[in-house]
Image (tube, helix red, strand yellow):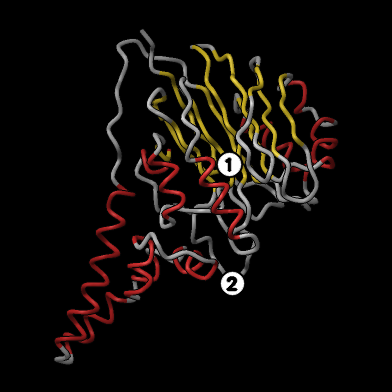
Amino acid sequence: MAIVAALPWIRPLRGRVVTIVRSLMPWATIPAVPVALLAARSGRRAAAVAAGAVAAAGVVTSVPLVVRRRQPRPAAPARPLSILHANLLFDNIRMHDVALTLEQVGADVLTFSEYTPHHARLLRASSLVAAYPHRIEEAAALASGTALWSRYPVTADHPPATRHHTVVGDVEGPDGTLRVIVVHTQSPVVHHRQWSDDLAVLATVVPDRPAVMTGDFNAGWSHPEFRAVMASGWRDVHQVVGRGLSSSWPVDRALLPPFIRLDHALVNDGVIVERVRDVDIPGSDHRGLLVDVSLLPTG
């Protein structure tokens, strides 16, 4: 348990196994609490101290994730823009239900990862398409495709050079322009080096305007590679509202509950997070997220 607690903070250690073990924080430190209590009760002082230290490490590293962050408040309230991100799962057979769910949610902007040509055909054939006339689509086989659908006009921009398709679009919302970046990194279990390279590329993305980066990062706060992206000027919306310990994967396993947040929406300093909630995506192994954001006035 001590090794698991320490690994997220030992940056030089890399590799597939290290990345998987890091995903277990902070949950792997929870058993240290009863171990410490039992050891203390039985008079095993050294074991009690060691287990207590591990439990304390889990608590200390988790506290920043559950404390709401202060945000600036403009004098005049802005109209929030709602953005929903969904990993569709490339072999999803419930796309009709997905379209109904998205229609009921009614977000202003939809972003998709694992967006295949088959998904594109089915969604374009649904009633959903009329509500989102502005689209940037990079449909691709298996898990490589991404897309951005919007109620408001969108202008495409050059994406960063990641393995899976990344989509970048400037959405002309009611209170100004918001850059939306849709990402999906490689799997660290299957393609660890490419995953690490993708996150390194995303860490160089520093927009000069209010921006949101949504997608399946295949990483959580316990991965130094993901924290490097956040350190370049981004905030995780779940952490902003004190829900940094929430999880989005996996949601399709009977015996394995969701234990890590792989799906994120990151915002830069030009954006205020108003509200965040999770959305069940039919047929997917990921839980979707819905965030309401507003733009800070410029000038």
Residue 175: give x, y in percent of width and height.
49, 12
The part of the image, by quadrant, that contains residue 270 is top left
In this view, the residue in front, 209 or 201, is 201
Q: Residue at x 38, y 11 (%)?
A: 298
In this view, the residue in front, 299 or 63, is 299
Residue, disc 2: 255
Quarter of the figure with the N terminus? bottom left
Q: Which residue in the rendered view is the most extreme toward the top?
A: 299
- Residue 207 is labelled as none
Label 1 – label 2 distance at C-alpha: 26 Å
Q: Residue at x 40, y 62 (%)?
A: 12
Residue 91: give x, y in percent of width and height.
78, 53
Q: Is residue 224 above or below residue 46?
A: above
Q: Secondary structure at mark 2?
A: loop
The part of the image, by quadrant, that contains residue 132 is top right
Q: Residues within 10 Å of mark 2 (few under 14, many from 20)?
A: few
Which mark sits nearer the N-terminus, 1 or 2? 1
Quarter of the figure with the C terminus? top left
In this view, the residue in front, 264 or 196, is 196
Q: Secondary structure at mark 1?
A: strand
Q: Is residue 96 above or below residue 270?
A: below
Of circles 1 and 2, which is in front? 1
Kind of residue at disc 1: Gly
Q: Is residue 205 above or below residue 294?
A: below
In this view, the residue in front, 10 or 48, is 10
- Residue 215 is labelled as 1
Q: Residue at x 69, y 48 (%)?
A: 282
Q: Is 285 placed left or right of 227 in the picture?
A: right
- Give the total of numbered labels: 2
